[in-house]
Image (cartoon, helix red, strand yellow):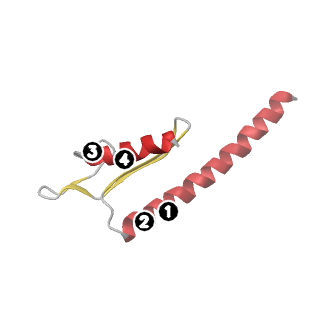
Amino acid sequence: MKHIVSFLVTILLSQYTVAQDKQLESFVQSYASENNFNGTVLVEKDSTILYHNSFGIADRRFNLPVNNETVYKVASITKAFTAVLILNLQQ
């Protein structure tokens, strides 16, 4: 009986996750198209990738599209993000 209940709960949760994924995908797709977004979006929860997709052009000189393996040159901008995250952890 426990196995049947576990199976049913797993089925229900997977349906809920699929619905969330579709909603997330729809939201990101509409944002990217409306705002001419160039980049990669990765949404992860509990070490599970919920969404991973890339949009736009990586190199305009050669008209190369962005893909999920595109390497971005972010330079020093990550220092500000790191500082904010550390201060949030402190609080």
- Numbered mark located on residue 35 in the image: none
Give the residue number, with chain letter if any, for mark 3.
70
Q: Residue at x 44, y 66 (%)?
A: 30
Q: Which mark is nearer the camera, 4 or 2?
A: 4
Q: Residues within 10 Å of mark 2 (few under 14, many from 20)?
A: few
Q: Estimate how packed mark 1 is, as few (under 14), some (14 to 19) or many (20 or more) residues with alpha carbons within 10 Å.
A: few
Q: Residue furthest front?
A: 91
- What label does residue 27 carry, if any? 1
- Which residue, given by chain and number where applicable, does mark 2 sit on? 31
The one nearer the camera, 82 or 23, is: 82
Amino acid type of the residue tagged 1 in the rendering: Phe
Q: Residues within 10 Å of mark 4 (few under 14, many from 20)?
A: few
| Distance of label 4 from label 2 (alpha carbons) | 22 Å
- Three-letter amino acid code at disc 3? Thr
Query: Residue 43, image x and y in percent?
Result: 48, 47
Numbered disc 2: secondary structure: helix
Residue 55, quarter of picture: bottom left
Marks 4 and 3 sit apart, C-alpha to C-alpha, by: 21 Å
Q: Position of residue 39 (x, y in %)?
A: 32, 54
Q: Which amino acid type corresponds to the residue marked 4 in the rendered image?
A: Phe
Marks 1 and 3, how far apart in space? 22 Å
Residue contact between numbered discs 4 and 2, judged by CB atoms under 8 Å: no
